[in-house]
Image: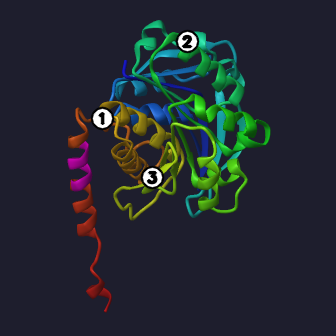
Amino acid sequence: MDVATVGHASIDIVKYGGRERKQLGGAAIYSALASKIFSKTGVVSRVGMDFPWDFYTLLKDVGVSTRGLKKTKGKSTTFTIEYDDAGRANYTSYSINVGVYIRPDDIPRDYLRAKAFHLAPMAATKQKHFIDFLRDNTDAIISMNTHIGYFPRYRKKLVQLIEHVDVFTLNDDEAKALMRESTLRRSINAFKKVPHNQIIITTGPGSSVILENGEISISHSQYQPMVVDLTGCGDAFAGAYISSYIKEKDPLKAASIASSVASIAASDWNFKAIKTLSFSSLELFHEHVLARQRKLGRRQRSIEHFL
C-alpha cells in the first residue's frame, strides 16, 4: 500500500432537475479515487448495513482497496445534495451516522506499511487521534484537509494540528475563515506565523499557493474551459497531491499535478472524469494532460471568428 485515505465514505442523495438518485460519495472516497491515479491506494472508513454492494465493486474495479471499509450495524453517512440550474451544489442535509465511530483501530494492519496517510475532513479531535496513532505506529507522511463546517467548533484545534502533519490543504475561502482574515494575502501572512511544514491553499480548479517553511510558491495547471461539478475537487486535490508527492518529494510539481487532477474532476459529474484514470508514472500523466489540452484547444474558436 502506498497511500491510505481515512475519513467518511457516504451515500449521497443527489437531486437535480426534479430527479433523485443515490451515488457513492464522501471526502475519503474522492481522495482515494484521485490518489489511485498514481499509487496503490486503500480507503479507511465506517459504513452502515445499507451501504450498497455495488459501491464496493466500483472501488475494487478501479483499483482502490476496500479492506479498510468496516461495515457496522446502523446507517451509513448520508449527504443530500441539491443542484440548481447553474450546476451549483447545495448540501441541504447530512447525517454522519456510523461514520462518527471511525477510529485508528479500523486501519488494517498491512495498511500501516503505507508511505502516506491522508486524513479527510473529520472532527479535529478525531483527526488528532489518528495523527497520534500514526506517529506512534508508522513512519508515513501524513496529510490532512478540513471543511469550513468544522471551524465554529474546532478552529483553534485545527490551527494547532497544522504543525503535526506534513501537509495541510484547504481552499482560499477556508484559509480566510480559519485565519479570520478578509483577504487571501492576509491569511497567507497569518499562516506564516503558524508552525507548519507544508500548507497548500487551492485557489480554484487550476492553481494553488504552496507555503513551505514560510516560503511561498505558486502552482498552475491546465485551463479548464467548462466546470460542471466542483463537488469533491478539494478532496481530489489532496489525494492527488500526496500520491504524487511521495514519488518525487517535489511540492511544486505535486501541486501542479494535483491541480490538474482537480481540474479534470470538475469537468464532469461526481468523480466520473477521474474514476478510470491510472498512470504508472507522472510523466505519462503529463502527456495525458497535454493531449487533453490540445483537444480542448481545437474546440475553442479563435478571436478572429468573432470579429
Indicate the quadrant containing the N terminus: top left, top right, bottom left or bottom right: top left
Indicate the secondary structure of the residue bearing disc 1. Answer: helix
Classify 10 Å Cα crowding around label 2: few (below 14), some (14-19), many (20 and above).
Answer: few
Q: Quadrant of residue 169?
A: top right
Label located before the other in sequence (3 or 1): 1
Q: Disc 3 vs disc 1: which is toward the camera?
A: 1
Classify 10 Å Cα crowding around label 1: few (below 14), some (14-19), many (20 and above).
Answer: few
Find out whether the residues at labels 3 and 2 contact each other: C-beta distance under 8 Å: no
Find out whether the residues at labels 2 and 1 contact each other: C-beta distance under 8 Å: no
Q: Which mark is residue 136?
A: 2
The magenta-colored residue range is: 285-290
Residue type of the residue flagged with mark 2: Asp
Q: Which mark is residue 278?
A: none
Q: Disc 3 vs disc 2: which is toward the camera?
A: 2
Indicate the quadrant containing the C terminus: top left, top right, bottom left or bottom right: bottom left
Q: Magenta-highlighted stretch: main secondary structure?
A: helix
Q: Quadrant of residue 71?
A: top right
